[in-house]
Image: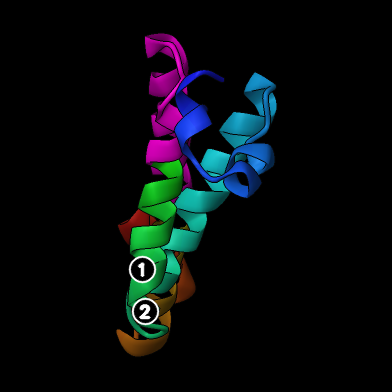
Amino acid sequence: MTALKFAPRVVADLIPSSPLGRSSLAFVAGALTVLAFAPYSLYLLAIATSALLFLLWLDAAPAAAFREGWMFGAGLLGVGVFWMHISIDQFGNVGTLLAMLITA
């Protein structure tokens, strides 16, 4: 963790050292990024989760950085598509089956 020595000690201690822990943290950060958009509009959350991803990348090897970025994107896309399904189903006045087909 040589690159994290410049980060505040509290933040550096929160970053897991195992690949599974780092990937899980990236996935959760990506999923939380969806809350930055409507209807919640927690704009600063997008900055915080992106900063967390960059913090994960500070001391990561290229393959680990790719995996963490992919997990962040999977969390963002997975939860984002779920919200698209809800908006199409509830506000688009189409059936649930058609809404699932549209978002698939």
- Hey, which quadrant is residue 55 in on the image? top left
- Please tell me which residue is depicted at 42% across the width and 86% down the height of the picture: 90
Q: Which residue is mark 2?
A: 87
Kind of element beneath mark 1: helix
Which residue range is magenta in the image?
54-77
Q: Position of residue 82 (x, y in %)?
A: 46, 63
Q: Position of residue 69 (x, y in %)?
A: 39, 32
Judge left or right: residue 3 versus residue 15.
left
Q: Position of residue 31 (x, y in %)?
A: 50, 55
Q: Is residue 103 above or below residue 21?
A: below
Could you give the CA–CA distance between mark 1 and mark 2, rounded to whole angstroms?
5 Å
- Please tell me which residue is depicted at 50% across the width and 61% down the height of the picture: 32
Disc 1 + disc 2, Cβ < 8 Å: yes
- Please tell me which residue is depicted at 33% across the width and 81% down the height of the picture: 38
Front residue (pair 31, 80) = 31
Q: Is residue 9 above or below residue 93?
A: above
Mark 2, residues whose alpha carbon is within 10 Å: few (<14), some, or many (≥20)?
Answer: some
